Amino acid sequence: MKLKIFLPLLVFLLSAGIRAQDPILFYEDSVKIGKGSLPGMGVLIPEVEYQKTFDNWIKTLESGTKSKVVTENGELSIFGANIKEIAPDPVNVYSRLSASDTGLYIGAAFELRKDLYIEKATGEAELARARTFLFNFAKDQYISLVEEQLKAEETKLKDLEKELGSLEREGSGMERTISKSEKTISSEAEKLTDLNNHLTSLTAAISEHSMELPSMNSGEERDTKEDYLKGLEKDKKKTLKSITKSEKKKRKAERALAKARSGIPKIDRNQDDVRKTIDDQAAVVQKYSGKLNQVKNFILN
């Protein structure tokens, strides 16, 4: 059995800090079919899922032909597969897929015509085309897997960025609350000063005019004084109501101010934590992006 190892990918995986995996391994190997074995080749693909790769392999073999893959005891066979990458005429393909801790192995034998299998004896050109076909399939599966890994990490990054945006909006809202509350407190404090001064004046006026009332004998003059006092009392009630309303508004603004001020430090800490997580996740995304580029640039020697 001859084995070809694609070391650049392995070196990249180790240096990138991503889960280290074996590289794609390519074998010039026989394929066990039934009780015997056929001359062929094999490839070991790291990380990929068995069922997804199994289904994709069947789709690839059945593409462009009415022939269907027959599966029996874990062995796959198709007669009359239209694989132009290998030969202009239909070929028969016998293959087997098996999963292990190191990856997914695909062994395949390509029959050009009865009992004539692609191997060195049939010619280097046919062998090279078959090897390229199998390798490209393996590479596509690996690319698809890494693209999914990258997409998952990018989704995590986007979610973190959304979380940061939400925290920033919350922080901005608190800042606006602080500014608004401070203005309200200041405004209501000034209003309360004016209202309380007005109340003091009203109370003094009521007391003064009330003292004058008993000495008035004239009905018209007394009525006028009483009406005037009633107006002062009405104004006093209105002023007291305004004071209560202003005090309530001021207390509400003070509570909002205290809550916002106490919440700002926590929001800031949370933002710092999320920013650090974003930086870490961005590095992970970059590593998977690099991994994807490496796999895409992979070539069969």
Image (cartoon, grey):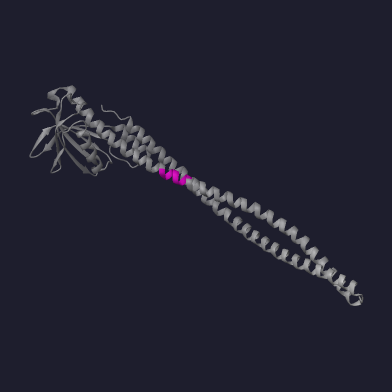
Q: Residue at x 70, y 65 (%)?
A: 244
Indicate the quadrant where residue 98 lies.
Answer: top left
Q: Position of residue 149 (x, y in %)?
A: 35, 41
Residue 156 magenta = yes
- Whether residue 184 is visible to the viewer of this picture, yes or no, is yes
Q: Does 133 sit left or right of 186 as displayed? A: left
Above or below, 45 against 297 in this view is below
Residue 237 included in the magenta stretch of the image: no
Q: Position of residue 165 (x, y in %)?
A: 51, 46
Outermost residue to the front: 220
Observer-nearest residue: 101 or 64? 64
**Image side of residue 259 versus residue 126, left or right:** right
Prevailing secondary structure of the magenta residues: helix
Q: Which residues are magenta?
A: 155-161
Q: Nearer the viewer, residue 214 or 18?
A: 214
Q: Quadrant of the C terminus?
A: top left
Which residue is at the front of the view, 99 or 27?
A: 99
**Residue in the picture at 86% in, 72% down:** 223
